[in-house]
Amino acid sequence: DSGVTQTPKHLITATGQRVTLRCSPRSGDLSVYWYQQSLDQGLQFLIQYYNGEERAKGNILERFSAQQFPDLHSELNLSSLELGDSALYFCASSSWGGVIDTQYFGPGTRLTVL
Amino acid sequence: DAKTTQPPSMDCAEGRAANLPCNHSTISGNEYVYWYRQIHSQGPQYIIHGLKNNETNEMASLIITEDRKSSTLILPHATLRDTAVYYCIVRVAVLEEVRFGAGTRLTVKP
């Protein structure tokens, strides 16, 4: 158990819909990362937040957005869903101990778009 | 821009040591070598990291060559539960995303 929690575990929805994935980081971790893993793309970094502020963006579509709240949990919003958005979505958290940080991953949310 | 090169797959007999190689010939002086693994669609699991010295923890050992251009992850006594995709990653230490490559699929066989 990494200490990172993600809800829901599974999500099935239809094309065109909007969903919200939730992540609670490990206690004390200020940084949250979102990753997408689809069968043909591998693990892709989407976006990072640090203490409520967006810090880095990766391959995140304009239809996707995220935020980190004052209690440090984060939500990833996916809208106008397409079949190709079906994937595993992982959240990771880390804290900066001064020199290094190690990311700990949650169990993921499996999104199926029908 | 792949920073690491790993063999796509490896087999290992249960109880034997699994030695997973990784080439990172363009590694910079401030980049660490990290290893993660992913067991069948679970979240990636941190294993170990190092800068230039060899490292050991309860899961594995990491051997980094003197020129830092390659490294080897060693699972000393592989079990069936070690069957997973192993990712070797180089990254600047602080608050940078993890850029996963294709990894090595390790299959531990009875």
Image (spheres, coloured by chain):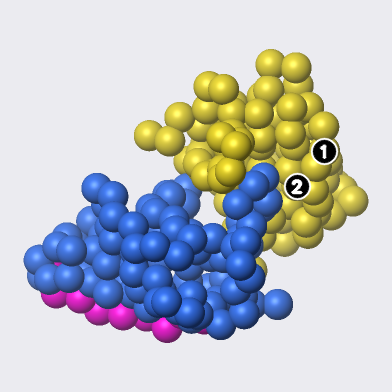
Chain colours: A yellow, B blue
Q: Mark 2 points at which residue?
A: A47
Q: Mark 1 lies on which chain?
A: A
Q: Name the residue under label 1.
A: A54
Dot 1 lies on which element?
strand
In the rendered image, residue A25, in percent from the top left (x then y), is placed at 58, 29
In the rendered image, residue B84, in percent from the top left (x then y), is placed at 35, 63
Left or right: A113 as drawn, with respect to B55: right
Can the viewer see residue A35? no
Mark earlier in primary sequence (2, 1): 2
In the rendered image, which quarter contains the N terminus of chain A? Answer: top left
Is residue B76 depicted above or below B67 in this figure?
above
Left or right: A84 as drawn, with respect to A89: right
Image quadrant where residue A18 sits: top right
In the rendered image, residue B33, in percent from the top left (x then y), is placed at 50, 63
Q: Do labels 2 and 1 share a chain?
A: yes
For label 2, the crowd category at 10 Å Cα-Cα, with few meaning under 14, some 14 to 19 and many 20 or more, is many
Q: Mark 2 lies on which chain?
A: A
Is residue B40 depicted above or below A19 in this figure?
below
User: Which residue occupies the extreme top position in the image?
Assistant: A71
Examine the structure image and report whether residue A3 is included in the region drawn in magenta: no
Instruction: Tell me which segment is drawn in magenta.
Output: B5-14
Can the viewer see residue A102? yes
Residue at left offset 68%, top offset 51% = B96
Q: What residue type is labelled 1?
A: Glu
Q: Do the residues labelled 2 and 1 touch (CB within 8 Å)?
A: yes
Q: Alpha-carbon distance for marks 2 and 1?
A: 8 Å
Please tell me which residue lies in front, B5 or A43.
Answer: B5
Residue at left offset 66%, top offset 37% = A32
